[in-house]
Amino acid sequence: MLDRTTAPVASALSVHAPLTGRRTLYCALVGATTIGLLWLAADAVPPRSVGAIAFIALFAITLPWSVIGFWNACIGFAIMRGARDPVGAVNPLTRTIRGDEPICAATAILVCIRSEIPTQVTRNLRPLLEGLAAAAVAPRFHIYLLSDTGDGKLVAAEEACFNAFIAEWRTGFEITYRRRANNSGFKAGNIRDFCDKWGHACEFAITFDADSFMPADAVLRIVRIMQANPALGILQTLAIGMPSTSAFARLFQFGMRLGMHSHTLGAAWWQGDCGPYWGHNAILRLAPFIEHCKMPILPGRGPLGGDVLSHDQVEAALMRRAGFAVRVLPVEGMSWEENPPTLMEFIRRDLRWCHGNMQYWRLLTMPGLKPVSRFQFVFAILMYLGSPAWMALLALGTIAIALSDASSAPIGRSGPGATLFAITLFMIFAPKMATCIDLLARRTARQAYGGALRFLVNVVSESLFSILLSPIMALTHTIFLFRLIVLRRGGTWNSQNRVSHAVPWSLAWTRLWPQTLAGVVVCGVIATRMPHYIGYALMSAGGLALSVPFAVATASPLIGRLFTQWGVGRIPEETEPPAALAALRLPAMEAGAVEILQRS
């Protein structure tokens, strides 16, 4: 008998989470750091002119992302190094299960698909189904393949593949394949359609994207946690990147792997029951989700009205408003996803998120939201608004250098300015640095990344990659936000190309010529007017000037193969392949296995 109540049940663990004190301390730390940095900025650039005042105002807009990330990293580092059970310290619900409780709840596994390669979807599902069948819990799970594919050629391949997959598993699992005639509401509409048709038949739903992968033991763990905690509405796992042969994906996910661990632990410590939902690799309690988490239709025409695009954080806020907890489970090795293989695909994905996050302006005054939920909306907006502020700072500094006397500092005082630059850079890299220190302090962790020397070489390689990528994305966000907010022109929400592929020079130039031009101008002005500032120029604009060769090189199949063979961007799954991932036969993991055999 399913418990279909939508009233939250008080958790016995809620008294052990002094979240008010944690949140007060966190706000005090963030506030004090912000004030201190603004004071230092005013010392570096005394506000005696319009340009100096503009500099301080723009710098203030860039601060939230770096300051919040810095303190999340510091708290996460303290927990990693000081807590006996770091995961339990930030999510005590993990301690409510032994791991052998019977699976009683009916759970739907929702795979959201739009114009994907269907064989990759079934490849990722097959090990999960095999594991659930081996655990003798198959009757408790129903798999729903929820397609929004509209392309005729892809539809035919999809239908053939999924029908064959259903026939393969017909004696073990219930599998439903449904394709919508249109994708109204996008992914949120896809899931809402499931809720309307079948949602009342299950107690929980696990949401997957087409590139998601979770083994059976991870699925059973999150189901058991949900069963044991009736007040838990959403439990989000920490999705990490799958091993890849793409040079871009390898370096990107290596950096994400470092930054996410400390950042997520620190954020979970103070967010507590008001945690994140990223829209996939998570489990939902369906009854309150169906009743309370329907997406609103935003008023007005244009790209910021209509359907909510970045639905996940809105659903988390609505679930929390209904009185149910939203928690993150910051455990590596439970769930995976595929990262974009090229800069072009990364930009496409990121601009979709940017577009969706800008709609959050309309939701800030939604009645009944928790203060932390409103903060999360503001933070999501500022994550992208910081980009035009950084670009404006770069333009302001370049203009000041072009107009200044070559024998003097262009803006303000060089000593405090250098200090401000160094502190800001340190805060930006703090999440990765925290995890690096923790990994280097643990022998088994060092070995999982290929040893201390290889790990440090990869840290340096990824740092250079990030320095080149960051200004490219900042100017890309700036151009997109101008089109979105000023010209009222949005982007397209097409599917991702998840397969590694080359990027032609012509395509890279067509898409990235504004970034290249901006970088050449900035570096050229500084090199000719004040060459002693060229280091700052390369840190801030070198990636812009090199954006075209950067896009081509990081997408090159040859470079990707060499990086895979040499272990550039290596993650633990390549050194010690998990049994669950081994069934996928990923080329990057097979290359790592060959190297291990050769060394042994």
Image: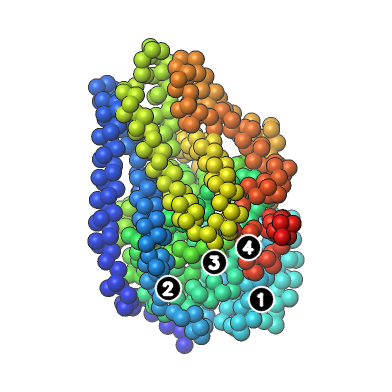
Mark 1 or 3 closer to N-term?
Answer: 1
- Where is mark 3, residue-wise? 334
How many circles with numbers are drawn on the protein? 4
Q: Which residue is drawn at 62% across and 32% down?
A: 548
Q: Which residue is drawn at 29% across and 48% down?
A: 30
Secondary structure, mark 3, is loop
Secondary structure, mark 2, is helix
Instruction: Say few, some or many: other residues with alpha carbon within 10 Å of mark 3 (under 14 / 14 to 19 / 20 or more).
Output: many
Query: Label 1 sits on what residue type?
Result: Glu
Q: Which mark is residue 576?
A: 4
Mark 3 or 4 closer to N-term?
Answer: 3
Mark 2 or 4 closer to N-term?
Answer: 2
Which of discs 1 and 4 lies nearer the camera? The answer is 4
Mark 1 or 4 closer to N-term?
Answer: 1
Query: Label 3 sits on what residue type?
Result: Met
- Where is mark 2, residue-wise? 94
- Where is mark 1, residue-wise? 130
Pointers 2 and 3 in contact (C-beta within 8 Å): no
Q: Distance between the Cα atoms at labels 2 and 1?
A: 25 Å
Instruction: Say few, some or many: other residues with alpha carbon within 10 Å of mark 2 (under 14 / 14 to 19 / 20 or more).
Output: many
